[in-house]
Amino acid sequence: MIEFYRVAKEYQGRRVLKDVTFKAKKGEFLFLTGPSGAGKSTLLRLIFHAEKPSEGQIIVNGMNVSGMPASRVPALRRSMGIVFQDYKLLPRRTVLENVTYVQKFLGVPAAERRRKAYQTLRLVELHHRMAALPEELSGGEQQRVALARALVNDPVLLIADEPTGNLDHRLASEVMKLLQDVSVRGTTVLVATHDMDLIRAAGRRCVTLDRGRVVEGLVEAALPPQAQGKRGEPEP
Amino acid sequence: MNRPAALAALVSEAFEGLVRARRMTSLSVVLIAISIGLVGAFFLVAENLRSVVETVRDESTVTVFLKSSATEADRADLERLAQATRLVMKLRRVSPDEARARFSTWWKSLGPAARSLPGNPFPASIEMELEPAAVSSEALPPFLKLLAAHRAAEEVQFDVEWIRRLRGAVALARLTGLVLAALLTLGAAFTIANVVRLTILLHRDEIEILRLVGAPELLIRGPFLLGGLVQGFLGALLALALLWIVTRAVLAWVAATKNALLGVFAVRFLPGSTCLMLIAFGLVAGLLGGILAVRRRNLAG
């Protein structure tokens, strides 16, 4: 479902990702972790083609993303759900509109859009705030709207960048349970997070990035001692 | 994809965007209306001049006043000359008595004086009604010279130059209108492009998000393109409405002045084809403006 083969990403001569190789199977739940500046966000941006790799091959949902023409990128992105760290909600749209905005322009009937949005918002306990604007919501609520938007299309791949960062412990656990349920239904889920407790509690495979390189292992090996000591250090 | 529903969503989004930026939209529509109104004003002048030309052309009859010594053979010769040119549609002989009777009819107050004269001062004449195309024919001036040089002709009355100049003025007004149309359409397109570009700037964050969540490119660009088209269309409609009001006002003024000279001008509004052309100018300006505004570099996140 996601395959990275010897992927590198360079910005103005500076290597942010080096020789990244890993694979996530269909329906697999995978964590992506590492210290700040390790390249997690860049890796996620490569998956939904917001960035192009400098080297290597990326296969997502059977499509070679590396050399994908711009005209096919919207379809690629619609095949996945993305939860952004800064939520990226449309500020002048209601919760309902945010969740169903793209569907509207794909010609999905209003009643069906509303029904699906209600069901998805119910999952994240926000079905009672469908008419609210993002500015009327707390950070945690906005995060859950972003999650609902990512889930509403039943994506084959779900990418979430710090999806529990603004949630209290109870809601964070609920969201993680929800994401795991989603993966059980066949959706590949890739969650980028700093939260080691969350990773340990989930007990799922974890890809650890350190200075742009990937270390793949189990929970216990998620952050090797040398990586833990270098958290927050700038990348070379 | 349900295409009609998607299209309806696109249209509603375009209108929503225009309403949201209503001040800029109104300003843009007014500026477009001024541009198209100026073009329309030129066409309006040309149209009314053309109607004057048509009125004059309808009366385009060459009158050959005959010398008193003119014989029947001379008359027949003049008529043969006229028929040979194919410029003349109809020929009519007017006797001196008929000429005096006409004068009395046209100038009622002078009629008794004309009748009281001892002799008939009105010469006999031949009226030659020209073919519609004859006024602009190259063959007309030599024909008039030939008539004037005829031994039986006292005078030839027909002011072809005046009609030609009037036609020239009509053509010039139309040409000016067309050149102005091209320039002002471009100007209107840039106005629309700037308004749409400002709207894009206002929605930059939304555009970025829509791209990230996989919105089709048509959805991102479509509402802005449609918005440009709607602005152009509304601007053209407003221009036509203003021109119509101006025409009505001129009509009312002409009627109120009772000026005989102004009576020659039967003030009329633009024909339907010109109205449609002005609307087309508006739409082209809107489409051009929209296309200029939604170029990728303007929409890049």
Image: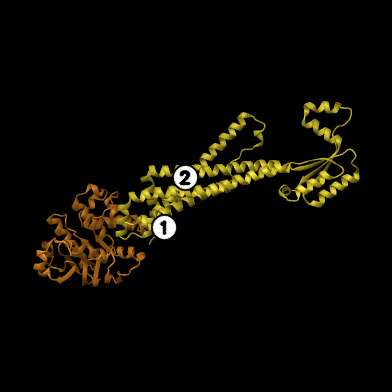
Chain colours: A orange, B yellow
**Type of the residue with mark 1:** Pro
Q: Is mark 2 on a helix, strand or loop?
A: helix
Tell me residue A203's x, y (percent).
12, 67
Residue depicted at 28% across the width and 70% down the height: A61
User: Looking at the rendered structure, which numbered label has been put on residue B4?
Assistant: 1
User: Relative to B283, is B120 on the left or the right?
Assistant: right
Q: Residue at x 36, y 45 (%)?
A: B21
Residue A22 in the image: state x and y as whole percent: 21, 72
The residue depicted at 75 percent of the width and 51 percent of the height is B139
**Amino acid type of the residue tagged 2 in the rendering:** Ile
Residue toward you, A129 or B114: B114
x and y, in percent, of residue A122 in the image: 22, 55
Whether residue B89 sits left or right of residue B190 in the image: it is: right
For the N terminus of chain A, the image quarter is bottom left
Which mark identifies residue A176?
Answer: none
Q: Quadrant of residue A80?
A: bottom left
- Numbered disc 1: secondary structure: helix
- Dividing the picture into quadrants, the one containing residue A111 is bottom left
Residue at the disc numbered 2:
B32
Q: Nearer the viewer, residue B46 or B273?
A: B46
